[in-house]
Image (cartoon, rainbow, N blue to C red):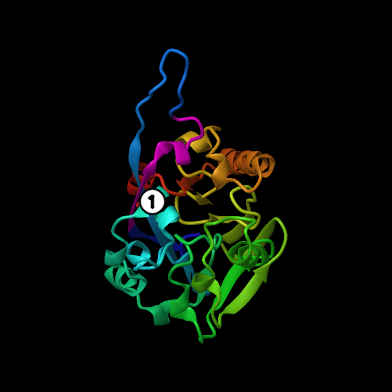
Amino acid sequence: MDDIEVTFLDRGRVQADRNFVVDGASVATASNRDPSHEYETYVVWNLVIETPEMTILWDTGSHPEAGDGYWPEPLYEAFAHVDADEHHLVDDLGGAGYELADIDAVVMSHLHLDHAGGLAEFAGTDVPVYVHREELPFAYFSANTDEGSIAYLQRDFDHDLNWQIVHGDSYHLTDGVELLHLPGHTPGLMGALIDRPGTPLLIVGDEAYVEANYAGQSMATSLLWSNAAWKESLERCRNIQRETGADVLLGHDLSVFESLA
């Protein structure tokens, strides 16, 4: 659609061992028992999607105090958001010419701590926050038990928010914006197909952290809720790309982000 505009927000850099992102990236073998490890830099991003009906914020990034004790130490040791303190949501929106008051709706791809850290900015407002039906209960379950995923922090998402629950495999949010249920990384992960001018944008998000994942190399087991669901979601994304010719935006691949942004 000619009247949809997508603005990319750079929300900082995360550093981590590639083994967390691409399963078996560096493994010991009989002939090489001490392989070298690749410690790489990844991107955290958000989007502002302007349509005639609404201005949408996609995800909210990490909490700015992620490296100052807000994130549990084991998580920060594995995925260090090294410049989170330089990327307050309000400031990054302002740098792109937006204010919080400009946002009509928030879409949460999922509620992991590097995506839900700015949700508190919308507490007590009537701004709808869209989340998949399978994500919200799993986030609370994970944050309050020893099961599920350790990447959920209840203080990120347990606020007075205007939750809007998305059901099913796809959800028509507004003209030109179709939300897609892509379970695998989490049970309620969402992507989207954006019918922007010229080339559509397929938001794959954390279904594939980097290009190697999109090519079929699985993420580390610790990053997958269900490997079988991940494979099905990946094939769905590839089919959509083939059918539409869309550009693909991956979860944390810095080079892909920079080429699209």
Q: Is residue 86 left or right of residue 124?
A: left
- As drawn, 202 above or below 210: below
At x 65% / y 62%, what residue is drawn? 138
Residue at position x 42%, y 63% in the image? 71
**Residue 213 x %, y %:** 51, 37
The picture places residue 73, in percent across and down from the top left corner, at 41, 58
Residue 212 in view here: yes
**In which quarter of the view is residue 39 placed?**
top left
58 vs 182: above or below: below
Q: Is residue 181 left or right of residue 210?
A: right
Q: Where residue 15 sits in the image (x, y, percent)?
A: 34, 47
Boundaries of the magenta span? 12-25
- Identify the element where label 1 is drawn: helix
Q: Nearer the viewer, residue 7 or 74?
A: 74
In the rendered structure, does residue 13 fall within the stretch colored magenta?
A: yes
Residue under circle 1?
Answer: 77
